[in-house]
Amino acid sequence: MSTTLIIIIITSIISFTAFGNHRILNDLIFYPPAIQRGQWYRFFSCGLIHADMGHLIFNMFTLYIFGEGRINTPAGPVYLGVEYKFIELFGKYGNLVYLGMYLLALGVCLLPTYAKNKDNYHYRSLGASGAVSAVVFASILFRPLMGMGLFFIPVYIAGFLFGIIYLVVSSIMDRKGGDHINHSAHIYGAVFGIGFTVLLCKIMGNYPVLRLFFDEIRNMSLTDLVQFG
């Protein structure tokens, strides 16, 4: 079983349990004042719980698409996800590198939120969105021209362009505030995913991911930017 599926199963089980148990929810949720008292595990445990079923399904489905990336072909299944790219690049360490990125992203994406709200007794946050953003943006690095879009809308734009729009919109929404979504975690998760992937590709795989990323964009055609279907 892939690391991606294990993460999805564990997260889903704990999230389902927390839906009906406020004690579990309160014990795991990201709560800056509690972290100040030494409960640092909340940086990571908050990624195991979600606000509702829609929140959980969206995050786990997105993680499956970009982490696993299974496509069925006549010759058999093909895996295009980040986990399998890491296995291709880092061999037997690929799964551990992938898991490490996911877990580190959970904590790193919340550091700015913690710094801003460490004395805010009314602030709480939950969900794996920051870590999922790291996986999505690592995938964009490897496949900048893959079609990306919103569910149920049959228009897809190149991944690198979708990523830019996503970060710009998230930054605007973060400054605006008031929608009870931690856009900061999405942004810093995405940035961490990019930085982690570039660094590990350089250190462990000697794989020029940035050069290949920009080469693909330079050589693209206009039809690669927008696709319908």
Image (cartoon, rainbow, N blue to C red):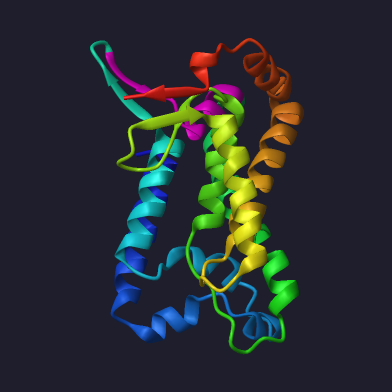
- Picture coordinates of residue 117 (x, y %)? 69, 79
Image x and y of residue 64, in percent:
38, 41
Q: Outermost residue, left direction? A: 74
Q: Name the residue furthest bottom.
A: 121
Q: Is residue 85 magenta?
A: yes
Q: Quadrant of the C terminus?
A: top left
Q: Which residues are magenta?
A: 76-89
Q: Position of residue 96 (x, y in %)?
A: 56, 41
Q: Is residue 139 above or below residue 45?
A: above
Seen at 68% across and 46% down, the residue is 191
Q: Nearer the viewer, residue 180 or 123?
A: 180
* Image coords of residue 121 (percent x, y): 62, 89
Residue 179, relative to residue 88: is it above or below?
below
Residue at (44% x, 25% y) in the render: 80
Front residue of 122/205: it is 122
Q: Residue 158 in magenta?
A: no
Left or right: residue 46 versus residue 78 is right
* Location of residue 144 (image quadrant): top right
Q: Is residue 54 above or below residue 224?
A: below
Figure quadrant of the N terminus: top left
Residue at 42% over, 79% down: 25
